[in-house]
Image (cartoon, helix red, strand yellow):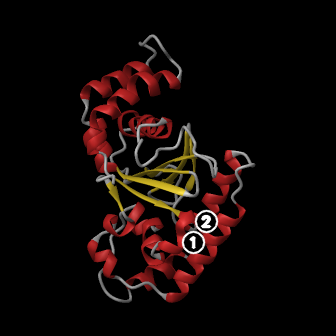
Amino acid sequence: MNVNKLEPKQALNRMYLKIKPDTEMIQEFKTNLDQLLEVCDSQKAEEFNKNLLIEFLKKTYYGDRYFINTKERSDLVIHNDKDVKSSVGVIFETKKPTRTVSAEMPKLDKLNTKALQQLVLYFLRERVTNKNIDIKHLVVTNIYEWFIFDARIFEELFFGNKALVKQFCDFEEGRLSGTKTDFFYQHIAEPAITKVIEQIKFTYFDLRDLENLDLIDLYKIFSPEHLLKLPFVNDSNTLNKIGRAHV
């Protein structure tokens, strides 16, 4: 058992958990999620599946209220506002939805893989280079499996590691012996993650096990109220009002 693994219910704000969603919203979410799982295709390019994920997020929650797209070398980001110039709130590393084990995807018993190392690089570029203090979550997903990290963990363990930040700056400025991103992953990110691996908590779920997952918890996990940490009012009608505002 991985003691750092959180179930969706454990990751959600306790007050947010008490808010009851509208039945129609949950049904729409389930329909959109089923469609995403039906059309994602391991035989297609990563870009194809990434676009499906963007469509799912926009259609279900974000609409035109939050800009969702790629940014520079990051696979996918959700901005904190509808303007492309607004700060990035969520950073994704996306992989193809393969049904076999991928060497690049994290595993419950092996978190320190290329995908997490890529997230560390993307985080440091946002946090150090862009001076972005508005990052809320970081995500690795292959459509089926989801690893969601609270940005506070990255802030403490990676931005708070001054030696790592210096290595990152030296790498970005071309002052090290390697300049390719694989050099950063293997010689900088991997050992930095190894040192703090037991402190990295994350939310995990696998959509291939959908029948055993709580739909309401899943709906909330993907929502901007969770991923972007939006404020909400704790009353029985709030989630209904929020959902209608997403449309």
The reply to whether dot 1 and dot 2 touch (C-beta < 8 Å) is yes
- Which residue lies under the disc numbered 2? 56
Q: Does residue 97 appear in the picture of this structure?
A: no
The kind of residue tagged 2 is Phe
Is 41 displayed left or right of 62 in the figure?
A: right
Assign a secondary structure to mark 2. Answer: helix
- Which residue lies under the disc numbered 1? 60
Question: Residue at coordinates 48% horizontally, 21% vertically from top-left?
Answer: 183
Say above or below: 109 vs 162: below
What percent of the width, then of the height, locates residue 185? 46, 28
Q: Nearer the viewer, residue 205 or 24?
A: 205
Q: Does residue 78 appear in the picture of this structure?
A: yes
The kind of residue tagged 1 is Thr
Quarter of the N terminus within the rendering? bottom left
Assign a secondary structure to mark 1. Answer: helix
Say above or below: 176 vs 126: above
| Residue 192 figure quarter | top left
Question: Residue at coordinates 61% horizontally, 59% vertically from top-left?
Answer: 53
What percent of the width, then of the height, locates residue 232? 33, 75
What percent of the width, then of the height, locates residue 123? 41, 40
